[in-house]
Image (spheres, helix red, strand yellow):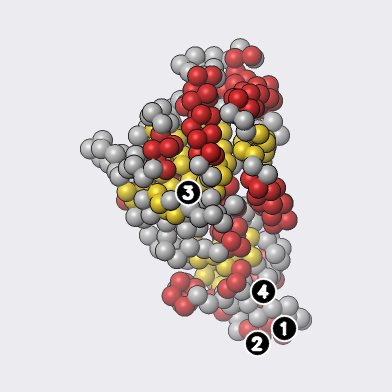
């Protein structure tokens, strides 16, 4: 089956569908059961065609707002977590009831960014999701809002859906929102985006909805994640009739984001997108060119400054002198060690430190270089 430039195969029939709070809640900010029923009907059709959908669903906080008598989305973290704690079970109950009516089993997966930060937990989450799909169930994924803090939040389920898509090597990500796609400056929907560059990002706006976070800004950030992983993305209006089957039939609904032809490998996806950075390494012009043009490792001679407090094995951001991000990678040396050996030749590391663990500050196999805009 072909979806624009996307091909599902027998070996990989996986796709991720993200639905926002604005689609499954009504004007009073309560869960819209009719919309939930329509969504589950469409996903059931997808499942019956032999594809393996993973649903990333917002709505837990909106579902809890009614029971706790909030008229608008709370701003206090404890109140948000209380709404999520009440609403998550209600949301999952509705999904379980509706999918059971279509003769499908659902599974709840609650994640925080810590689950992506740890390589072991990242792989465990992947294995769990793939096993659930093999067992013919429909995973329903959400951020674990009841326990997260500001420091470990994804920030929105758009980013979460992109990370889930890269986690399971999905063939397509569909983000269902309350807009028809990405609009140009005249208000027309852009049918296709070949590259998420600065010009495209300048078209984005946030959201002021009382049940939501994010907006087009977060959707474009998510687009950068998936297209650089070789996965196409469609942003479409979730209230359009039969929107998911129509997209899968190849109809040009919404905005299609084309996948990058030089996609990152699985490990480099994890380095580039899933991990929080612990510090920064600033490099000179020669090192920037070597990383971008020749795909080399980062050596101490190209390091001009170090920021943050990090240890060997931590993720660090590599920037040029102007502060622009060049790459992310797993550092072989701690911040205190790099301060001492920056600007030095590899052969002098042992003399300076009294030992030499590695020639490279970051080996190229552990370095994800950012695409130039």
Q: CA distance from mark 4 to mark 3?
A: 46 Å
- Which residue matches tag 4? 340
Residue 28 visible somewhere in the drawing: yes
Disc on the earlier residue, 1 or 3: 3
Badge 1 element: helix
Residue 179 percent across, percent down from the top left: 37, 32
Residue 174 percent across, percent down from the top left: 46, 42
Residue 113: image quadrant is top right
Tell us which disc is closer to us: 4 or 3.
3
Disc on the earlier residue, 4 or 1: 4
Residue 319 percent across, percent down from the top left: 51, 63
Tell us which disc is closer to us: 1 or 3.
3
Category of crowding for the residue at label 3, using alpha-carbon neighbours closer than 10 angstroms: few (below 14), some (14–19), many (at least 20): many
- Which residue matches tag 3? 172
Badge 3 element: loop
- Which residue matches tag 2? 347
Q: At 68% from the left edge and 70% from the top edge, which residue is drawn?
A: 332
Which is nearer the eye, 47 or 162? 47
Q: CA distance from mark 4 to mark 2?
A: 14 Å
Tell us which disc is closer to us: 4 or 1.
1
Q: At 53% from the left edge and 77% from the top edge, which residue is drawn?
A: 296
Disc on the earlier residue, 3 or 2: 3
Q: At 60% from the left edge and 21% from the top edge, which residue is drawn?
A: 63
Q: Is 190 on the left or on the right of 111, as rendered?
A: left
Residue 350, label in figure: 1
Q: CA distance from mark 1 to mark 3?
A: 48 Å
Badge 2 element: helix
Residue contact at pointers 1 and 2, CB within 8 angstroms = yes
Residue 246: image quadrant is top left
Q: CA distance from mark 4 to mark 1?
A: 11 Å
């Amino acid at each position: 089956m072909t979806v624009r430039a996307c091909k599902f195969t027998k070996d990989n029939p996986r796709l991720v569908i993200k639905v926002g709070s604005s689609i499954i809640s009504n004007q009073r900010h309560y869960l819209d059961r009719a919309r939930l029923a329509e969504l589950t009907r469409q996903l059931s059709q997808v499942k019956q065609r032999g594809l393996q959908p993973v649903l990333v669903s917002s709505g837990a906080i909106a579902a809890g707002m009614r029971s706790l008598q909030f008229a608008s989305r709370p701003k206090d973290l404890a109140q948000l977590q209380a709404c999520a704690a009440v609403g998550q079970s209600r949301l999952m109950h509705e999904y379980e009831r509706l999918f059971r009516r279509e003769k499908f089993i659902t599974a709840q997966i609650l994640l925080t960014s810590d689950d992506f930060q740890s390589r072991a937990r990242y792989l465990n989450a992947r294995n769990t999701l793939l096993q659930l799909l093999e067992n013919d169930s429909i995973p329903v994924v959400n951020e674990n809002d009841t326990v997260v803090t500001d420091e470990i939040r994804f920030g929105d389920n758009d980013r979460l859906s992109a990370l889930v898509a890269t986690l399971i090597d999905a063939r397509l990500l569909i983000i269902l929102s309350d807009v028809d796609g990405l609009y140009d400056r005249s208000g027309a929907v852009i049918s296709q985006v070949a590259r998420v560059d600065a010009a495209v990002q300048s078209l984005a706006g946030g959201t002021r909805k009382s049940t939501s976070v994010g907006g087009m800004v977060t959707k474009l950030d998510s687009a950068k994640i998936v297209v650089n992983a070789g996965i196409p993305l469609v942003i479409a209006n979730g209230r359009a009739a039969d929107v998911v089957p129509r997209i899968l039939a190849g109809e040009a609904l919404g905005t299609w984001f084309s996948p990058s032809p030089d996609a990152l490998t699985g490990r480099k996806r994890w380095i580039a997108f899933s991990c929080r950075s612990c510090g920064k390494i600033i490099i000179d012009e020669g090192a920037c060119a070597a990383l971008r043009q020749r795909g080399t490792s980062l050596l101490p001679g190209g390091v001009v400054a170090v920021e943050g407090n990090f240890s060997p094995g931590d993720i660090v951001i590599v920037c040029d002198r102007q502060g622009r991000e060049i790459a992310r990678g797993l550092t072989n040396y701690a911040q205190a060690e790099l301060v001492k050996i920056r600007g030095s030749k590899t052969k002098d590391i042992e003399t300076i430190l009294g030992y030499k663990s590695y020639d490279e500050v970051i080996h190229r196999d552990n370095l994800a270089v950012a695409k130039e805009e």
